[in-house]
Image: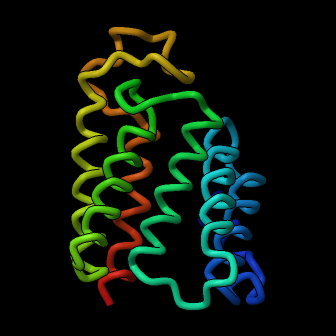
Amino acid sequence: RGAEAMRALPASAWYTPASALAAMGQALRRAIGGSSGPFYACALVRAAQVLDGVARPTLSQWAQAFDQGVQALAELGGAQPGQRTMLDALRPAADTLLAAAQVGSSPAQAFAEAVAAARKGAEATAEMVPAQGRASYLGERTRGIPDGGAVAVVCWLDALEPVIAR
């Protein structure tokens, strides 16, 4: 549903990075059920605000926008890394992207490192007991299975990587 919502956006949505992020956020809010839609919407709208007025963002600006989007998601949901949520993939990815931008990595290298950090974070959720979200009532029964939200983050980051590497 989320991908279909993205494909249905009008061409005008893609005019600037900020308008694209804001439009994607609103589309995902409407298309994705549960808490993920509003969480992604909040993150994308905050990232759009960071890039407002920036026509061609630098890697550092993209990293800051991503970081602020992740922070907005954490604020909305009240979760922290280590509680077996999508933040366990997002926070390491954002931190890695910021660090790579600070040392002057290429966008492709920085993003590849961020995806690897997200993957490692998502995999680590398999050994965590959920403290937030819908899975929290399952407790120990979740051990051995990575958090679905964290895995979803890795899926969409993986899908973006070839585009970033161009």
Visual colour scheme: rainbow
Quadrant hosting residue 166:
bottom left
Q: Is residue 99 above or below residue 61?
A: above
Could you tell me if residue 4 is visible in this image? no
- Name the residue rendered at 25%, 82% in the picture: 106
Q: Is residue 140 above or below residue 121?
A: above
**Is 117 in front, or is 142?**
117
**Is 153 in front, or is 83?**
83
Q: Position of residue 108 (x, y in %)?
A: 27, 80
- Name the residue rendered at 60%, 46% in the picture: 72
From the viewer's perspective, is 20 left or right of 58? right
Q: Position of residue 22 (x, y in %)?
A: 71, 68
Could you tell me if residue 71 is visible in this image? yes
- Name the residue rendered at 25%, 68% in the picture: 100
From the viewer's perspective, is 57 left or right of 5? left
Quadrant hosting residue 134:
top right
Q: Position of residue 103 (x, y in %)?
A: 21, 72
